[in-house]
Image (cartoon, rainbow, N blue to C red):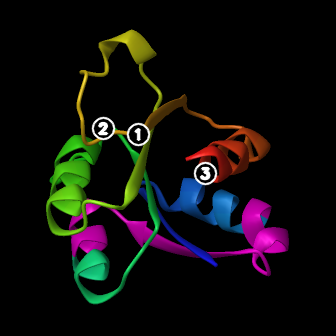
Amino acid sequence: MNKILIVDDEQNILNSMRRLLRLKRSEIEFNFALGGSEALKILESSDYTCLVTDLNMPGVSGLELAASAKKSKPEIKVIILSGDSLPNVPDNSNIDAVLSKPCDIEELLRTIKDL
């Protein structure tokens, strides 16, 4: 079973994603972290197959979180969600996919499956 960590610095976004993904819990295990610092702690203590993170967060950014996750677990897949225009996201080998934010849940699930 895929184990996915979803990270955002806005609790309302995490709550919304949790509600939308509730029906997929039998297929995929989803966990949620409020911000990059919390996500780093969670990633240290558990193995995830995929990290889905907001790009722009205070403190630990999505790019910093991706780099740290790939350094400790090179096999983890990283999806960046960005509310900014996507061409501004730097080319980074730590990123496997970039989706615009807000992200359609079905598009996110297809991307996770395709990675």
Q: Position of residue 4 (x, y in %)?
A: 52, 68
What residue sits right under mark 2 in the picture? 56
Q: Is residue 105 above or below residue 9?
A: above
What residue sits right under mark 3 in the picture? 112
Q: Is residue 95 left or right of residue 31?
A: left
Q: Amino acid at mark 2?
A: Asn
Residue nearest the viewer, comparing 24 with 1: 1
What residue sits right under mark 1 in the picture? 96
Looking at the rendered structure, the secondary structure element under dot 2 is loop
Residue displayed at 28% across by 46% down = 62
Looking at the rendered structure, the secondary structure element under dot 3 is helix
Residue displayed at 26% across by 51% down = 66
Q: Nearer the viewer, mark 2 or mark 1?
A: 1
As measured in the structure, the alpha-carbon distance from the residue carrying label 2 to the one carrying label 3 is 21 Å
As measured in the structure, the alpha-carbon distance from the residue carrying label 2 to the one carrying label 1 is 17 Å
Q: Is residue 27 above or below residue 20?
A: below
Neighbour tally class for label 1: few under 14, some 14-19, many 20 plus, Cα within 10 Å? some
Residue nearest the viewer, comparing 13 with 32: 32
Residue displayed at 17% across by 53% down = 60
Q: Is residue 9 visible?
A: no
Q: Amino acid at mark 3?
A: Ile
Q: Amino acid at mark 1?
A: Asp
- Residue 104 placement: quadrant: top right
Q: Is residue 72 above or below residue 77?
A: below
Q: Is residue 63 visible?
A: yes
Mark 2 or mark 1, which has the lower sequence index?
2
Range drawn in magenta = 20-40
Say whether residue 13 is magenta: no
